[in-house]
Amino acid sequence: MTKDVMILTGAGQIGMAIARRMGYGMKIVIGDKNIKNAEAIADIMNKAGFDSVPVETDLSSRESIKNIIAESQKYGEIAMLVNAAGVSPSQAPIDAILKVDLYGTAVLLEEVGKVIKPGGTGVTISSQSGHRMPALTPEQDRLLATTPTEELLSLEILQPKNIHDTLHAYQMAKRCNVKRVMAEAVKWGERGARVNSISPGIIVTPLAIDEFNGPRGDFYKNMFAKYPAGRPGTADEVANVAELLMRPMGAFITGADFLIDGGATASYFYGPLNPDSK
């Protein structure tokens, strides 16, 4: 018996929250570069009554992405994609951030878009960081959106001389995610499918808790005090947005990005988090 399939890349709290909200009755194929992470999330899901299976997946590899798609198709048609995989500025060097977060996401959207079931939906998790960077030129945006995936990392704006540090690389990757979703939404639409992105702010996860309790804890507390929500977000709050985007109630939404950061970006530009404020 075949089932509709959800591909979940990135075995973390946000991806799992979305999968728990959207994946009942489906086969959930969980991909992560660390197979133990994928196995742990699959075990939690299965013990809660879901039907999931782990697959080792390296988002920086087209071959690996094609492999998880092929594995997924053994169970049925791919009806949903949840891409929550990636590396952060503190976790990886510049080249790895660009290869995983920028190139890998573009390839995943491209390859799943070739086979997504009519009526299917997808979300990719971007970041508030992509909204903090100064605006690019229309031509730069177009190149990020439409350059063939195998040529993306050769773009002039992504060369080492133009990337200042790992944070800048991450911001460029997340800006590319948003632009890529817009372009891919046109292609997905030809199959009667939709795809959107979500740009979360600081979300409570085990890694974030370590940060809150570590040397940078006071920095985060100060930041929370200076933006409207006054607190970090939760994975389930991101899942709330994903549910809107992936269910029929969001049928008129595609190619869009939803910023969910408690007003941190608003405060960064127009409030007390502005670097130039006194």
Image: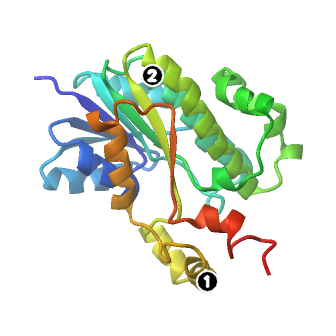
Farthest right residue in view: 161
Pointer 2 or 1: first along the chain: 2
Q: Which residue is mark 1?
A: 222
Q: Position of residue 149 (x, y in %)?
A: 64, 24
Q: Secondary structure at mark 2?
A: helix
Name the side, left or right, on which 231 lies relative to 192: right
Can you tell which of label 2 and label 1 is closer to the viewer? 1
* Amino acid at the residue labelled 1: Asn
Q: Position of residue 121 (x, y in %)?
A: 36, 31
Residue at 50% across / 18% down in the picture? Answer: 187
Q: Position of residue 128 (x, y in %)?
A: 59, 56
- Between the C-alphas of marks 2 and 1, the distance is 42 Å
Q: Dot 2 surroundings within 10 Å: few (below 14), some, or many (20 or more)?
A: many
Q: Is residue 120 above or below residue 114?
A: below
Farthest top residue in view: 190
Q: Which mark is residue 113?
A: 2
Quadrant position of the N terminus in the picture: top left
Residue at 34% across / 53% down in the picture? Answer: 239
Name the side, left or right, on which 126 lies relative to 193: right
Name the side, left or right, on which 7 lies relative to 169: left
- Residue in front for this viewpoint, 41 or 19: 19
- Residue in front for this viewpoint, 228 or 39: 228
Name the side, left or right, on which 50 lies relative to 73: left
Asked whether residue 39 is in view, the answer is yes
Residue at 33% across / 60% down in the picture? Answer: 236
* Amino acid at the residue labelled 2: Gly
